[in-house]
Amino acid sequence: MQEQQHSSPSKEKRDLLVFQLGPVQDFIAQARSTRDLWSGSFMLSWLMAHALNAVVREGQLRNEDVIMPSINRDDNPLVFFLRDRNAPPKDEAEVQRALIPNLPNRFTVLVPAGRGPELAKNAVWAVQTELQRMGNAVWQWLEGQGAKPEWKAQWDEQLRAFLQTSWAVRTISPDTDIWHSPDGQGVSDLVNRMLAARRNTRDFTQWPAAFDDALKPWSKDSLSGKEEVIGDKEFWERLRKQCGGIFTTEAHAYGAVNLIKRLWVHAKGETQRYANYLPEKLNVSNHEVWTEISVSSIPEIAEKNDVTGTSDRPGHSGNPYVAILMFDGDRMGEKLDRFGEKREATRKVSQVLSAFALKRVKAIVESHDGTLVYAGGDDVLAILPSTKAIACAQDIRKAFREEGAAFEFDGSCGIAIGHEKAPLQMLVREARRMEGVAKSRYGRSALAIALYKRSGEIIEWGCKWDSEALPLMRRVTELSRDGRLSGRFPYALSGLLQPYELERLTDAASFEGMSEIVLGEFRHVVSQQGLGLTPQDREELQGKARAYLEELVRGLSQDSGARPGDFINLFLAETFINRLRGEE
C-alpha cells in the first residue's frame, strides 16, 4: 500500500500548529537498567507517533504538511506502520529503525485554516487513549498476579495525571513566510512563544483523597519518588518471586506509569508471561521485537571495557565502570535561519536528522560495544563501556557533521562515568548536566565529562572537539597500555602541581608565566614514570603537553571557559577511565 497522500490547498489560509508532550527528561531518567532507559524513551516516541498520526489522519494531510519531523516512510517507519497496520516491513533493518526511540516530543504541522484547535485536541485524545490502552493491557496482566480491583481507581488516576500536553495555533496567509516577517520575527517564533507561555500556565486539579483507609499509601514509587506504589507489600513480595529478573530489588516498588515501563514490551517468546502489548500493536512478531530491543545489562556493558593485565573478577574485564553519553546539536534554530527558503530548508533538515538518527547512530554506538537508548534528531542518549565513550562521542559528532554538512551542523556532548552499581538516574542526570557544561563553559562544539569515584570524589574535565587535549589524552592511553608510561604518572604529576593551585588561577598573564614551570614539572615526572619511553616518545609527549598548555592560556585570555586546572584533570580523568580495576 502506498503512503497516504491527500490534496492540500495551496492558495488558502492555513493554521500553523505546534504540539508538545511531556514530561521527557525526568521520566526517561527514572531507570534502574538499560531496559528501563530504552522503554521510557520508546514509550514517549510511541505516544508522539499516535498524536502525530491522529493529526495527519483527521486533517487529511500530505507528508509535506508535516514540517517537523519528517514522516516519509524512510525517515520515520514507526509513524508509517501506525498509519498502515497491514503493511509488512521491507526488511529487518526497517523493523530495527522503527524500534529506535527517535521521535522528538514536539511536532510542527500546517493544517487547514480553522482546524488547528480541533486537530490539536485530537492529538491530545490520541495520546491519552493510547496510554490508557497500554495501561489496561498491563493491568490485566497484573490482575493475573493478584492485583486487587480496588487498586484500579488509583491506577487510572496516576495515568490521568502523568501526561502534560500543550499546543499553540496561528492562522497564516498562503504567501506568509513562516520563518521571517518584516519586523524580524517569524510566525514560527511567535507560535513557539505562545506554546512556551501555555506551558508556563500550569493546570492544577485536586488530587483525590485516599480511595479507602485501607489503601493509604505505604510507600512512594522507587524511581519517581512521587506517585504512590500500586498494591500492598504482599503483592510486591509475590511479584518478586514470580517475575524473575523483572522485579528483583528488595524494597523497590512502583506506581502505575513505571509499572507500564517495566512490563509493556517484554516479548522474549513468552506470549502469556508478560503484557506483550507492543508486538501486537506494531504488527511484528515477538521474536522480531525481542531481537531488536534486547539490550545488554549494565554489568555486561562494563565487561566490554578495554583493559591491560588480568582481573581478579572471573568473567569480568576488571573495570566495572560505565558511561552515560548525551549528545545534542548546537544552535539548531539558528542554522535554519541562515539557509534558503525556510519551510523547504526545515523539511530538508528534518530528513537529514532522521537519516543521522535512524541510519547511523545505532551502528556507531554498537561498534563501541554500547547500547543506544534514544536517537531523536540531533539528540542522542547511549550507555557505553567507560573506556570507549570518548571515541564513540567523537564518531557521533563526525557523523552528525557529515550528514548536516550543508547546514554546518555541529554538536556538544556530556558524559557521566560511574560504577556499574551507581544509581543510573544519577548518571543520566549528570550526563545531561555535563552536556550543558560543554555548551556553556566550553562554548559549544565541545565535550565535558564528570567522573564519579565510589569514594565520593568527582573529577570534571572538558575541552573543544578540536582541542590539543584529546590527542594528548589518546597518546597517554596508548603509552600506558603498552607499559611504557607508569600508571602512577598522573598521581605523581598531580602531587607536584598541587602546590601551584592551578584551579585558582583566573589571570591569563599569571598562568602564562607559570606554564613553563608546569611544563618543567611535567618533563620531570615523565622522566621518572616513563622509563619505557624512547627519546622520541618523550619529545612527542612534551610537545603535545606544551600545545595544550598554550591553548589553555589562550582560552583564559579570551574568557572562553578554559580552566588551568583542566591540565592536570586531563591526566586524572584518563587514568580513571582506563584503570584496570576498582579505585586502584
Image (cartoon, rainbow, N blue to C red):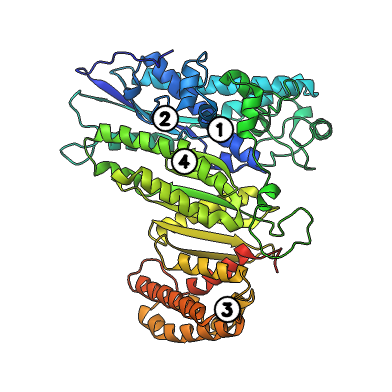
> Callout 2 environment at 10 Å: few (<14), some (14 to 19), or many (20+)?
many
Q: How many marks?
A: 4
Residue 136 position (above or below residue 359): above
Question: In the rendered image, which residue does mark 3 sit on?
Answer: 494
The one of 278 and 207 positioned closer to us in this rendering = 278
The one of 437 and 39 positioned closer to us in this rendering = 39
Disc ID at residue 323: none
In which quadrant will I find the N terminus? top left
Question: In the rendered image, which residue does mark 2 sit on?
Answer: 75
Q: State the CA–CA distance, disc 1 to disc 4.
A: 18 Å
Question: x, y percentage for residue 426?
Answer: 61, 51
Q: Earlier in the sequence, mark 1 or mark 3?
A: 1
Question: In the rendered image, which residue does mark 4 sit on?
Answer: 360
The one of 305 and 184 positioned closer to us in this rendering = 305
Confirm whether residue 124 shows in the render: no
The secondary element bearing badge 2 is classed as loop
Q: Earlier in the sequence, mark 2 or mark 4?
A: 2
The secondary element bearing badge 4 is classed as loop
Task: Give the left or right position of residue 480, taking residue 351 as reference.
Answer: right
Disc ID at residue 42: 1
